[in-house]
Image: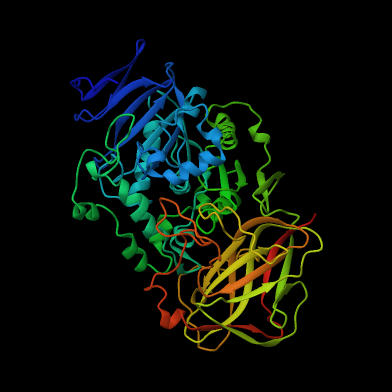
Amino acid sequence: MTGAGPASPTGVRKFSLTPSETLEIATAHDGQTRTAVADGMRIIWDIPIRMDDGAVLRADLYLPIAPGAYPVVLSHGCYGKGLLMQVGFPTAWELMIKNFPEVAEGTTSKYTSWEVVDPEKWVPDGYACLRIDSRGSGRSPGVFDPMSPRELKDLYDCIEWAGTQPWSNGKVGMAGISYYGQNQWYVAKHKPPHLAAICVWEGCADMYREAMYHGGIMCDMVPNAQDMQMSPFQHGRGERGPRNPVTGDLVCGPETLSDEELADNRIRILETIRSRKLHDEWYAERSADWSKTETPLLSCANWGGQPLHPRGNFDGFVHAASSQKWLEVHGFEHWTLFYTDYGVALQKRFFDHFLKGEDNGWDNEARVQLNVRHPGDVFVPRQENEWPLARTAWSKFYLDPLTMTLGREIPSAAEPLTYEALGKGLTFLSQPLVEPLELTGPAAARLFISSATTDADIFLVLRVLDPAGDDVLFRGALDPQAPVAQGWLRASHRKLDAARSQPWQPFHPHDELWPLTPGEAVQADVEIHPTSIVIPTGYRLGLTVLGRDFEHDRTSATLSNIKFPMRGCGPFLHTDPTDRPPEVFGQSYSLHFDEGRMPYVLLPVIPQ
């Protein structure tokens, strides 16, 4: 590794990368930018990228050794471009390598960072990999305000910068998981000219409905994530932060700020979302606009990603204005398949076509590629043409209050069933199946509910039970023991947008409150996020109606980056006392079963 050379009169420093080539890289006069040839790559650390307001973001660039102009795979986010996954997210790394040892093959893993591509698996195939610390994170100074208009403007400018560098062929693609997928949806609506394709791997698209409020119920996840996996990598932690073991550099920059200064340099997310209980322009700015999303896209969803990620991936495929769009759906942990041979090959075929211009048959690929889920973590690949599937037999399964069953026959009217909001709720089970039943697609429920107070929180859990009556749980995106699907709705948010609603996906504008009159039943249409399961013969299908988060009765699970043990919902709990005061949401609710308005769940049955 060589240090930075003397500054030229124009403020541009020259770095000798190979004996045959010299690249000019604009840099600050602080000696941070360095370069090396290692592990089959030309690597430049801490390249400065100046924003329109004078702020400087820092980026790491991984290039092939041979001189040339290459397609760029770009990521921009808050988890520290120099942080090794093994250091920052050790339990996630260990679980991935245990189940998929291929991830560590053909790479030293010295450059593997959380939720972004491993350059050692991309650079040999002629890609330039560019990792950028977003403003206020890692080695990029500034105020940390994730997904804000300022951060998206930064990302737009970084794309345009990357598309005009001498090592770039002018085509920039974005690839990454979660945060690094989510911001792809958000920047695409601004149409950066050099953004040629996006691969959104499990990235939400609606900040209000998927991240902050589920059905109008505040979620604890984002404030906890800021504490656990965002703030620890905020710029200014200096020696209190980790080091990049390859370079020895401090992941969070050389600057050391006090705790008070760090707090002043980041958004107070808990206070912000508590103060914004209804959907407004603040959330809209931090969400996708499908009418303006025209970039070629590969949207990769996870059946077990609810509530944060799958909805945006499905909606992006269905509603984006792009004429060149594909949907892939898989299972397992949300960070795993991205790094496997399966995930890398899928991404490269997509990017080879759109960034390199290769005629590799990608344009003839089936628009929908599903890994259909079976019990036991078995997935069967299947190609489809659309989503939801055109042959879906949308089927109403009615809740029978007399037998507590779930069936296709409309039951008789009956007295309401009352349950404690924070208790075990009500569970309705089908008869044991006499033949396999496949459910693949979005779902919805229509309930008629009243409360002892002026509001009610509805938590729905779609379940599968084996012949012994035990829950069949699945490896979710984060929680290793998750149910088939879930849905949420606060009754005072039951207002529907008729123009945007479908029978299988009710859409709530969340723009005004409709309080309940105690004891008076109202209709509540609840969105249940897309799922896939082939239920074997002899198993039962179930629906549980709760007034709180679902919890299984098995041993809880932990991850190093998750604040609390997981009991079936991962980190997506809804326990904020200011949002769910017990005097309103801790009393009793009633389900109503009247002639002409019988509750049901609408399920996507796929004919055998």
Residue 500 horizontal/vertical position (percent): 58, 63
Residue 594 horizontal/vertical position (percent): 68, 85
Q: Residue at (37%, 59%) from the top-left corner?
A: 223
Which quadrant would residue 426 be assigned to in this image?
bottom right
Instruction: Examine the rendering and report whether any part of residue 514 can be seen.
Output: yes
- Relative to the observer, which residue lies in front, 20 or 575? 575
Is residue 219 placed above or below 448 in the rendered structure?
A: above
Horizontally, residue 291 falls left or right of residue 376, namely left
Is residue 293 placed above or below 459 in the rendered structure?
A: above
- Relative to the observer, which residue lies in front, 502 or 117? 117
Residue found farthest to the top:
20
Is residue 150 placed above or below 573 in the rendered structure?
A: above
Which quadrant would residue 504 be assigned to in this image?
bottom right
Horizontally, residue 35 falls left or right of residue 97, namely left
The C terminus lies in which quarter of the figure? bottom right
Horizontally, residue 426 falls left or right of residue 33, namely right
Q: How many marks?
A: 0
Q: Residue at (66%, 77%) from the top-left corner?
A: 599
Instruction: Examine the rendering and report whether any part of residue 338 can be seen.
Output: no
Residue 485 horizontal/vertical position (percent): 60, 61
Q: Residue at (20%, 23%) from the top-left corner?
A: 10
**Colour mapping:** rainbow
- Relative to the observer, which residue lies in front, 72 or 449? 449
Is residue 267 placed above or below 368 in the rendered structure?
A: below
Residue 17 horizontal/vertical position (percent): 34, 17
The N terminus lies in which quarter of the figure? top left
